[in-house]
Image: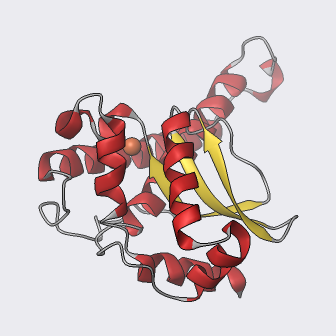
Amino acid sequence: MNYQAKQLPFKPDSLKGISDKTSLTHDKLYQAYVAKKDQIQAELKNVDLTTANQTYSQLRALKDAETFAVNGAYLHEIYFAGLGGDGAPKGDIIEQINQDFGSFEQFTALAKACAMAARGWAVLAWDTFEQCLHIYNGDAHNQGGVWGALPILTIDVYEHAYFMDYGSDRKAYLEALFQNIDWQAVDQRWSQIKR
Ligand code: FE
């Protein structure tokens, strides 16, 4: 396996309005997705291919679990990578945001609303087909993703991301989250995608 879990790119107690307890618990969940990804992909090497069946088979169960675990790992890695900053817009990504969403303010209003409307993730992605930025929503790690859209900034709205700090007040969590976005780090991912 080439994919290794990464360390949190910020100190767990350094975020504004998101507690170290939330960040450490969240990191444990991410590490668990990476471990399950390894386990599932190891089991896939030994699965009985002759019993493959769309209603139930070991291969079906593992392939379904694989997308949940893999996306769980990748979406969280991008989520953490986008945090630890001061929320101030920086970099070329902001020009593209202005072009595709009208203004940074219009983008943040749309992103927060999409995050209120999702049950799992709101994802700012580069749509390689339409050649523009777009926000796609997912209700689970393996639902709602668009193949051909490359995630740049992910917003986790699973309850584990905010319930300890805000109870059911997701809006307050999102306000805090946006004050911690590291737009320089987001811009780095954007320059890799542009290349
Ligand atoms: Fe999460």
Q: Position of residue 62 (x, y in %)?
A: 62, 30
Tell me how many marks there are: 0
Residue situated furthest right in the rendering: 129
Q: Quadrant of the C terminus?
A: bottom right
Measured as percent of width and height from the top left, residue 72 is found at 49, 45
Q: Nearer the viewer, residue 22 or 37?
A: 22
**Residue 53 picture quarter:** top right
Left or right of 96? Residue 41 is left
For image coordinates 29% across by 71% down, the residue present is: 9
Residue 56 placement: quadrant = top right
Residue 169 shown left or right of residue 5 in the figure: left
In this view of the protein, which residue sits in the foreground, 146 or 183? 183
Q: Is residue 30 above or below residue 81?
A: above
In the image, what residue occupies the spot 75% across and 49% down? 146
At 79% from the left and 59% from the top, the residue drawn is: 148
Q: State which image quarter holds ligand 1.
A: top left
Which of 105 and 143 lies nearest the eye of the viewer? Answer: 105
Q: Is residue 102 left or right of residue 93?
A: right
